[in-house]
Amino acid sequence: MTGPPSPVLRAFGAGAATPVRLPGGRGRTWRAGSIVLRPHDEPVESDWRSGVLADLRHTPDFRAPRPVAASDGTWRSGGWEALEWLDARADETRVADVIRAGDAFHRAVAHLDRPAFLDRSDDAWSRADRMVWAEARLPREPSLDRLAAAFRPVVSPSQLVHGDLLGNVLFAPARPPVVIDWPPYWRPVGLGAAVAAVDAACWHGVSVSRLLPLGDGVAEWEQLLVRALAFRITTLVLLDVWDVDGADRHRPVIDALV
């Protein structure tokens, strides 16, 4: 994908900067001087998220990049959106620290109402989320069959959560962690931590023996881990990238949970 064009750079006040592609973000995120630019999501979702992040109260336990307005006062220009650049780095092995930052972020957004655009979201991640929570039928796949057999009712209340914390909490010395790239879901708050935990176990070498302790104090933690792992596998199936290697990678975590 090519970087943001000159009119977009000028609209966000970065006309003199040379864009540099950043790691992560599915290869779609670019730094231009003091801002980060990326193609925006569905416009209503993009504007909603920018409005929330612009006013979100930070704490000593987390911060988030503030959105940058375009020259016309809106949050978007030419299919792109912009945020301030914060110098920090991901470390997926620091899963307990990621979860703590996610908890702080979730406390800060707990007062927000459920946005209507969630009902219209139709990407693989949104569809997988609905399937795991019995709002649509799961794909037929032996790994999912094992997890679905372990599903139990979850009664914890739902709120807005960050559904992809592990690689999207960044760290810098002597500064609060940075929470970026917020995909919003309306689920029990512990689900964000559970997705981070299973991601760490499946992809970043964190021992499965740490899964239960990571959720100390989280209501219905074991069930949220099962749902989180089913969500990740369902997404891979819907994206048509689930294969033998994926099954082998996830099997030890499934064995530990069911």
Image (tube, grey):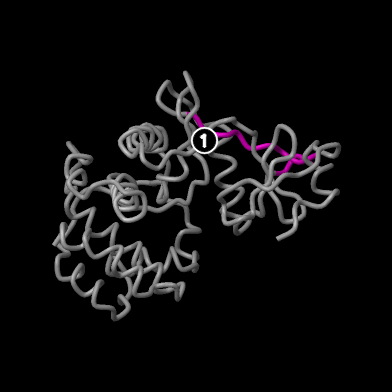
Residue 72 forms part of the magenta stretch: yes
Residue at 46% of width from left, 72% of height from top? 239
- Please name the predominant secondary structure of the magenta segment in the image: loop
Residue 32 percent across, percent down from the top left = 74, 39
Q: Is residue 24 left or right of residue 220?
A: right
Q: Nearer the viewer, residue 179 or 174?
A: 174
Q: Is residue 16 above or below residue 190?
A: above
Q: Is residue 191 left or right of residue 9?
A: left
Determine the residue positioned at 57% across, 34% down. 65
Q: Is residue 119 left or right of residue 1?
A: left
Residue denoted by label 1: 89
The location of residue 257, given as percent across then percent down, is: 16, 58
What element does badge 1 sit on?
Answer: strand
Residue 224 point in image, percent of width and height? 23, 53
Q: Is residue 28 magenta?
A: no
Range drawn in magenta: 63-74
Query: Residue at 39% of width from left, 73% of height from top?
Result: 242
Q: Quadrant of the C terminus?
A: bottom left
Q: Name the quadrant of the N terminus.
A: bottom right
Residue at the farthest top position: 174
Within 10 Å of disc 1 (Cα), the crowding (few <14, some 14-19, many 20+) is: some
Q: How far from the left and from the top, in percent, is residue 26?
A: 57, 56
| Residue under the point 48% across and 39% down | 90
In the foreground, 148 or 204: 204
* Residue type beneath disc 1: Arg
Task: Decide if residue 200 is on the left or right side of residue 35.
Answer: left
Q: Quadrant of residue 104?
A: top left
In the rendered view, tell whether residue 233 sits above or below residue 155.
below
